[in-house]
Image: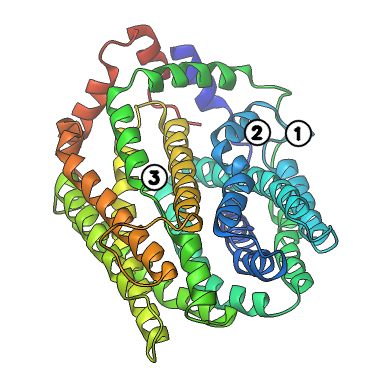
Amino acid sequence: MAAQQNSQTSEKPALSLNKGNLIIIIIATMLLTTLPQPAVLGKLPIQHLLLKGLHVDKTQMAGFWFIIGLAWYFKPFAGIFTDAFPLFGTRRRHYLLISSALCAASWIALAFVPKTYSALLWTCMIINAFMVIASTVGGAILVEAGQAMGSTGRFTAIRGIVMYSANIITGPLAGFLASGAFALATGVNGLAMFMLVPLTFWFMIEQPRRATNYEILENSKVQLGKIGRSGVMWAAIVFLGLYYFAPGFATPLYFRQNHQLHFSQQMIGNIGIFSGTAQVLGAILYGILIKRFQIRNLILVTVLLSAISTMAYLLYNPGGDAYLRAILIDSQAGFFGGLCEMALLDLAARATPRGSEGLGYSLMLSIRNVALFGSDVLGSRLADNGWHLPFVGGNLHDSTFHSLVYLNAGTTFIVFLLVPLLPGVIMKSRDDDKVLQQEVMEQDLLGQDPSLTSEFEGREL
């Protein structure tokens, strides 16, 4: 082990440690691998085409987003691959150059493929495949540079600011693109993605690496074994899965905005300004509260508030002030949803076994993504089948939508009742509580091979 440590410390960083260049690359990768995603800036234009051009139903639309997200569900393994197998002698530069260029080309190709469900689906899957590689490399640059320069916290803060800002500007810009020609939307997304190519070429400097790093592959096998034996992490996985798999109504809501409330695409996009800002405020508030309260109390309160705030969608109905109500309802849902999301992501981070932070946390986020998009498919299928609760009245559109709201809120409330069943050792913790954090780590290591524990602790991908 000592020999390994010495070899690690003596190895020179592969990245150039020019802070100005690194900040440019980190901001560029975070912004340009977030905005031009099909499910971000491309979502409203693609939804509009599916709804108005192909006349898909809710289940088909929700299924579209679930399937094209396939690459994101396997993102942790993209990290293992890019770390272990350098491309043309580098682990970051050439992966970023090539994946960005191919992703941009795929966006342009989307304008020319036949406007059929299958052609759009396969092309968006290809876009996401290249996008995942670029996003994975961007995250790796942040971690590697932050560790080498002792600036991980500051670089992470930059990442958060950039991504939150992207969420706020996405809505109105996507609404504008959805209101115009589809080729304009694909061109803007392709141009945004291609901007990463010259930025990487000029500012991304990386020293050559050896051909293959088999140690990373061995580390990954050991970490997967540790994750499989972690009772704390599996408890968190089950809890996160139950929360996010509450039957969703994101796609039914989009149909309602179009067909019952008659909002334009620009109006739908503009709502994102308010809901995105509210989500940022919720995340900021959580950062303050976690320093003062145990995570158990914050999860209890935020999950309950999330369930209550969902009930406000029962008022998402036509009327003279429908648009103002929509803004207010989406804003409060964004605030309480952002607050709750931070608590759950914090839970995921604390439950990750020591020495498997990168891979374990990524795996939990992948499970979260599968459950989130899968729940929308389930909710959309129920809506298409005209399902509604016996006590919910009104016309078919209102009764099915309102029933989904009740079902989502009720399922979330059941998850609230399960919070006390989470492992007490992790639920007592809060930020800066070193003693309890150490207890979590020690409990995770019980029953494991001591030799594996001592050799691989403290490493992350």
Please state if 290 lies on the left or on the right of 183 as rendered. left
Q: Is residue 356 visible?
A: yes
Q: Position of residue 261 (x, y in %)?
A: 47, 80
Q: Nearer the viewer, mark 1 or mark 3?
A: 3
Q: CA distance from mark 1 to mark 2?
A: 8 Å
Residues marked 1 and 2 touching at CB (< 8 Å):
yes
Residue found 25% across the figure and 58% down from its top: 307
Label whose residue precedes the other's in the sequence (1 or 3): 1
Marks 3 and 2, how far apart at CA: 31 Å
Q: Find disc 1 in the rendering and name its residue.
A: 87
Q: Earlier in the sequence, mark 3 or mark 2?
A: 2
Mark 2 lies on residue? 82
Q: How far apart in space, not on screen, are marks 1 and 3 (Cα)? A: 38 Å
Task: Give the residue type that dot 3 points to.
Answer: Phe
Q: Which mark is residue 245?
A: 3
Look at the numbered discs 1 and 3 and tell me whether their residues touch, using CB distance below 8 Å.
Answer: no
* Nearest-to-viewer mark from 3 and 2: 3
Residue furthest toward the bottom? 320
Q: Secondary structure at mark 2?
A: helix
- Mark 1 is surrounded, within 10 Å at the Cα level, by few (under 14), some (14 to 19) or many (20 or more) other residues, namely some
Residue found at x 39% / y 20%: 228
Is 374 above or below relative to 436?
A: below
Quarter location, residue 321: bottom left
Asked whether the viewer can see residue 429, the reply is no
Spot occupied by residue 363 in the image (x, y as percentages of width and height): 46, 34
Assess disc 3: are there few (<14), some (14-19) or many (≥20) residues with their C-alpha within 10 Å of its C-alpha. Answer: many
Task: Say what secondary structure mark 1 lies in.
Answer: loop
